[in-house]
Image: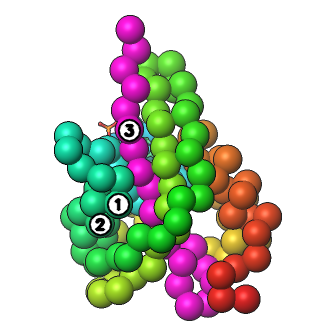
Amino acid sequence: MKKTVQVVGAVIENEHGEILCALRSNAMSLPNLWEFPGGKIEDGEKPEETLCREIHEELGCDIEVAQMVEDTTYDYGNIIVNLRTYLAKIVRGEPDAAEHAALVWIPRVSLKSLIWAPADIPAVEILSAERTETA
Ligand SMILES: Nc1nc2c([nH]c(=O)n2[C@H]2C[C@H](O)[C@@H](COP(=O)(O)OP(=O)(O)OP(=O)(O)O)O2)c(=O)[nH]1
């Protein structure tokens, strides 16, 4: 049976209403696709705990997690990914692309100009149709 992995992604919004988008590197699976930074939930972790841990490890900053944006399950063929995305804000530090090929801040209306990992597309659709939190 195919494995389903539980993954969480942070939709980090700044004070200008822009969202942090991360480009998966050649060293990662799904290379050269954009994603919400995050990762796999480990045993015993709450989704919010995973997000704070992963963002600290991957981007070197700390976040506060707010409400869920979307819960999607996508079958990549070799693996099934259940991706839950959450709104978040940086509370300490600046994001640094330690693992990703690039990080960019993009306004919600322009999110669809990037090529996203397929599991992220429902969240991107929701976010690009909504007003910014700060608007
Ligand atoms: N972090 C993250 N992963 C995503 C997103 N969309 C999506 O399909 N994924 C996939 C990619 C990976 O298969 C898995 C998350 O794994 P990970 O972030 O821990 O990445 P990884 O490179 O260590 O995983 P892997 O190479 O072992 O697959 O979920 C997303 O928005 N954020």
Rendered residue at 53%/59% (across/down): 68
Q: Position of residue 70 (x, y in %)?
A: 59, 51
Task: Name the residue that disc number 3 marks.
Answer: 6
Report the amino acid beneath label 3.
Answer: Gln
Q: Position of residue 36 (x, y in %)?
A: 48, 58
Q: Position of residue 26 (x, y in %)?
A: 37, 46
Residue 104 in view (yes/no): no
Give the label, 2 or 1, closer to the camera. Answer: 1
Cα–Cα gap, marks 2 and 1: 6 Å
Q: Nearer the viewer, residue 88 or 33?
A: 88
**Do the CB atoms of the residues marked 2 and 1 lie less than 8 Å apart?**
yes
Cα–Cα gap, marks 3 and 1: 13 Å
Seen in the picture, residue 45 relative to 48 is either above or below; the reply is: above
**Do the CB atoms of the residues marked 2 and 3 lie less than 8 Å apart?**
no
State which quadrant residue 74 falls in. top right
Relative horizontal placement of residue 45, taking residue 70 as reference (left or right) = left
Q: Position of residue 73 (x, y in %)?
A: 55, 33
Rendered residue at 35%/76% (across/down): 63
Q: Which residues are magenta?
A: 1-25
Q: Secondary structure at mark 2?
A: helix
Could you say which disc has been placed on residue 52 in the image? 2
Report the amino acid beneath label 2.
Answer: Cys
Report the amino acid beneath label 1.
Answer: Glu
Task: Name the residue that disc number 1 marks.
Answer: 48
State which quadrant residue 17 falls in. bottom right
Give the mark, 3 or 1, whose residue is nearer the N terminus.
3
